[in-house]
Image (cartoon, grey):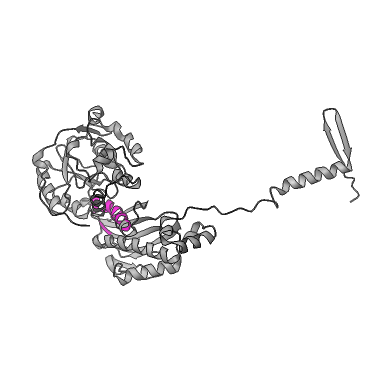
Amino acid sequence: PGCIQQCVASRGQLCIEGAWLWQLKDWIDRNWMAGYTTALPEMEAETEEPSEIAKAAGKDALAVLAHASMRCGGCGAKVGATVLSNVMRKLKAQALVDAKDNGVLIGLDSPDDCAVVAADENRRATVHTVDFFRSFIRDPYLFGKIAANHALSDCHAMCAEAKTALAIAVVPFGVESKVEDTLYQMMSGAVEILKESNCSLVGGHTCEGSELALGFVVNGLVAPEQALRKGGMKAGDAVIITKGVGTGTVLAADMRGKVKGAWLPDTLRSMCQSNKEGAHILQRNGATSCTDVTGFGLLGHLVEMAQAAQARVKISLGDISTLDGAEECVKAGIFSSLQPANIRLKRAVENEEEALKHSKYPLLFDPQTAGGLLATVPAAEAEKCIVALQVAGYHKARVIGSVDTVGEVANGAIVCDSGPFQESQTPTISVKEEVM
């Protein structure tokens, strides 16, 4: 009050002043500041394409989503308590989960924050592993089986006994009845696989998301001296793989609508087959090293083993078993999106120029979902081991190479041969195919 409000404006040699100029300047400044404070436009919620599950549910589900508010993150993204309770009640009614299994003291029947498991009386070491990925098929039940099998595979590869599992589930948002059914179908498949390995589901976490996804933290036990590891290769050992390769290229073809119906059953059956019995067969036949073949592909995991033993390994590309349609997909130029990253490991192949001529060479880099076991056994035990594996249902188990030298190559080396390894060591017996 009492202050004369004046303003001066100048440009070049022109200069003006006055109270009216101050009012104009004040109006300009206030409008400019309001653009960053009180006059901000109201933010609209981002719209997402409805999930395939919501679309399949019909107009009711789409109507609910159209009028729903922006989906929250953090714990606001959790699946509702009613949905989760209903799913767990159904699983318990079918005896798919049992709180008394594997020494579980506090589990799914208790409201506590953590599961509690009794200590192992034999003082075995604990093993811990985790896997998680989004769905690649529209059947939540089948996806649950594959996700659980994939997560258990690390324990099986070390001949560890899986004891408990914690689930991490993401379910596409939609009407409650559809969310509940999807979660129930997925967890039914998963728990079936867990029970086959005598592994108890003791808890987990759920949340909403744009895509169906599932993973597990698996905890187990193993006597340290009995654990199969990657670094035990010995010169002269035979290299064995228990399943065919090609899940990455076949699933990529399926996503593009290029897969043939006759090819998928073999891939799905392979991904649902547990590695548990295969690992024990390998162990009984004197396995010196072992790992499961997953995202890094056959070559990637073989390189890990070769590096651990500083070994040079020779493999026969012609002896590698493939899943139905895998070679056709590769010839058509269909690859997994992870293939380019895996190809960087080609630096470990000493004779890449020769290897490139073989049609199966690209499949060395194909990422596997719930793939087989890759192991080395004494050459004298290889034939007997292959027969036992095939009798147990691992119909595509093969000897694919041998360990040439150990302790001589710092980063490991792979030599690819186009010819057969030793036909006498890769018998193929007549067995009845199991129907998934």
Q: Is residue 166 above or below residue 296?
A: below
Point out residue 314 in the picture as x, y percentages from the top left corner.
Answer: 19, 34
Q: Residue at x 78, y 44 (%)?
A: 28
Q: Is residue 170 left or right of residue 96?
A: right
User: In the figure, is residue 107 to the left or right of 314?
Assistant: right
Residue sitting nearer the eye, 290 or 358: 358
Give above or below for 415 relative to 305. above
Point 49% across, 53% down: residue: 48
Q: Is residue 397 visible?
A: yes
Residue ranking furthest to the front: 59
In the image, 368 versus 381, the foreground residue is 368
The answer, for residue 301, to whether it is visible in the render is no
The count of marks equals 0
Q: Name the residue rendered at 54%, 52% in the picture.
A: 46
Residue 296: x and y, percent? 31, 42
Is 82 on the left or on the right of 243, as rendered? right
- Identified at 44% across, 66% down, the residue is 176
Q: Quadrant of the C terminus?
A: bottom left
Question: What percent of the width, then of the height, locates residue 16?
Answer: 87, 35
- The answer to whether 281 appears left or right of 102 in the picture is left
In depth, the one of 139 and 107 nearer the eye is: 139
Range of residues picked out in magenta? 143-162
